[in-house]
Image (tube, rainbow, N blue to C red):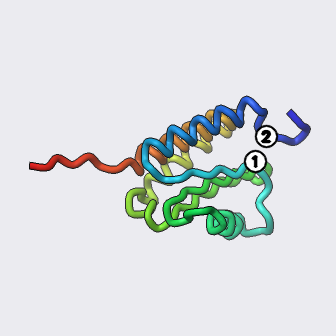
Amino acid sequence: MAAGEPLTESDRLALDRAIRVAEETCRFEFSVYVGPAEGDDTRAWATRLHNRLVAPSRSLLVLVDPSRRVIEVVTGGDVRRRLSDAEVELAVLAMSSEFAAGNLLVGLQRGIAMLAEHARPQNTLHA
């Protein structure tokens, strides 16, 4: 691990697996940014990153700036129809708890899994 790098190569591979599972679960695209946010407004920086994604309306971006202890989750319009602010807040709380214990990878995995589960399409029964 390079000095200042928050995730090892094996951590990145594990995070990629967690993202793939999440995307299969809810059919939305996940992106994770771990590093310094530019400027003073971390929400604006996260939103700019989100808007650069291939399909922002069907995407979720999780930004974690470990040095500032900031977590931002940006959701596209299609995602917001299935994922409430309260559900996002629960995932952020779970991530924060793990991060406070020094578990960056576990926190990301847990938060991503929670977001995907909450955004999962509802099964409907047809008569």
Seen from the viewer's position, the closer of residues 52 and 80 is 52
From this view, report whether residue 4 is shown above or below residue 53. above
Residue farthest to the right, as pictured:
3
Image-quadrant location for residue 19: top right
Residue farthest to the top, as pictured:
10
Residue shown at 80% from the left, 55% from the top: 36
Residue shown at 91% from the left, 38% from the top: 3
Q: Position of residue 54 (x, y in %)?
A: 60, 62
Discs 2, 1 touching: Cβ within 8 Å: yes
Residue 7 badge: none
Q: Which residue is mark 1?
A: 66
Secondary structure type for disc 1: loop
From this view, report whether residue 10 is shown above or below residue 117. above
Amino acid type shown at disc 1: Pro
Amino acid type shown at disc 2: Pro
Q: Nearer the viewer, mark 2 or mark 1?
A: 2
Secondary structure type for disc 2: loop
Q: Position of residue 120 (x, y in %)?
A: 38, 47
Residue shown at 55% from the left, 40% from the top: 20
Seen from the viewer's position, the closer of residues 83 and 79 is 79
Crowding at dot 2, Cα within 10 Å, few <14 / some 14-19 / many 20+, comes out as: some
Q: Is 1 positioned to the left or the right of 76 in the image?
A: right
Q: Is 115 positioned to the left or the right of 45 in the image?
A: left
From this view, report whether residue 24 is shown above or below residue 68. above
Residue 6 badge: 2
